[in-house]
Image: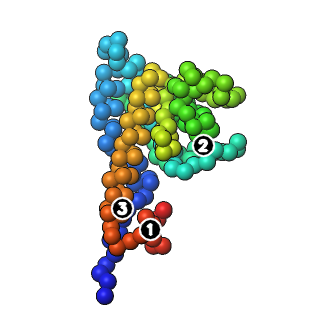
């Protein structure tokens, strides 16, 4: 008789939230320094998103529906001066369409820009296709925050899949009763 099967939580939204909670303290620490030195972010506001894994670009994609998880950071409690959420989503959409971070697009592949693409740096695309984007501060800091978030998300995913990969009682990553 076989014992109870182990339940593996692989929910992408859960992983995205866990990853966001990992990077949020570092983001908040830097945003608290906003405007204090020439090296600090220019404001204490940021919008950070991650797209659903496996999202496929189409000309009519609703990028809002492709966002898996997002968070606003407003360390001064004020409303955002600009629509940073829209800017982050536009950066993510350009990255989804091209497969490149917006910083790379603007500096190395400007021929790939299309009408409506966001010119600002601040998205990230990992080799496995995770797409994150941030907006609110200087583009290079936006990109740094997006990179942090993508790295944390993929680390959480690896942490959660390792028990499955090491489980000698199963052959499939996802079985019929599990999400995936």
Q: What element carries label 3?
A: helix
Residue under the point 47% across and 23% down: 139
Q: Which of marks 1 and 2 is nearer the N terminus?
A: 2
Q: Do the residues labelled 3 and 1 touch (CB within 8 Å)?
A: no
Spot occupied by residue 43 in the image (x, y as percentages of width and height): 40, 21
Which quarter shows the N terminus?
A: bottom left
Element class at badge 2? helix
For the residues bearing labels 3 and 2, Cβ distance under 8 angstroms: no
Q: Mark 2 points at which residue?
A: 63
Is 96 placed left or right of 50 in the picture? right
Give the CA distance from mark 3 to mark 2: 32 Å
> For residue 171, what is the image quadrant?
bottom left
Q: Name, please, the residue furthest toward the bottom.
A: 1
From the viewer's perspective, is the residue at label 3 or at label 2 nearer? 3
Question: Label 1: how many residues lie within 10 Å, few (<14), some (14-19) or many (20+)?
Answer: few
Name above or below for residue 128 compared with residue 113. Answer: below
* Dot 2 alpha-carbon crowd within 10 angstroms: few under 14, some 14 to 19, many 20 or more: some
Disc sitting over residue 172 in the figure:
1
Residue sitting farthest toward the top: 38
Q: Position of residue 77 (x, y in %)?
A: 37, 30
Decide which of tag 3 and tag 1 comes sooner along the chain: 3
The residue labelled by disc 3 is: 165
Q: Toward the viewer: 17 or 125?
A: 125
């Amino acid at each position: 008789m076989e014992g109870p099967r182990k339940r593996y939580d692989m929910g992408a939204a859960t992983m995205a939230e866990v990853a966001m909670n990992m990077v949020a303290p570092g983001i908040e620490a830097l945003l608290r320094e906003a405007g204090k030195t020439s090296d600090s972010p220019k404001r204490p506001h940021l919008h950070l998103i991650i797209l659903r894994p496996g999202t496929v670009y189409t000309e009519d994609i609703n990028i809002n529906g492709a966002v898996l998880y997002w968070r606003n950071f407003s360390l001064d409690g004020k409303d955002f001066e600009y629509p940073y959420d829209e800017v982050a989503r536009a950066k993510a959409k350009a990255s989804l369409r091209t497969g490149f971070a917006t910083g790379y697009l603007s500096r190395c592949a400007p021929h790939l820009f299309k009408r409506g693409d966001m010119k600002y740096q601040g998205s990230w695309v990992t080799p496995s296709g995770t797409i994150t984007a941030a907006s609110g501060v200087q583009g290079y800091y936006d990109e740094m925050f997006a990179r942090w978030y993508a790295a944390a998300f993929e680390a959480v995913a690896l942490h959660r899949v390792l028990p499955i990969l090491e489980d000698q009682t199963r052959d499939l990553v996802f079985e019929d009763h599990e999400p995936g």
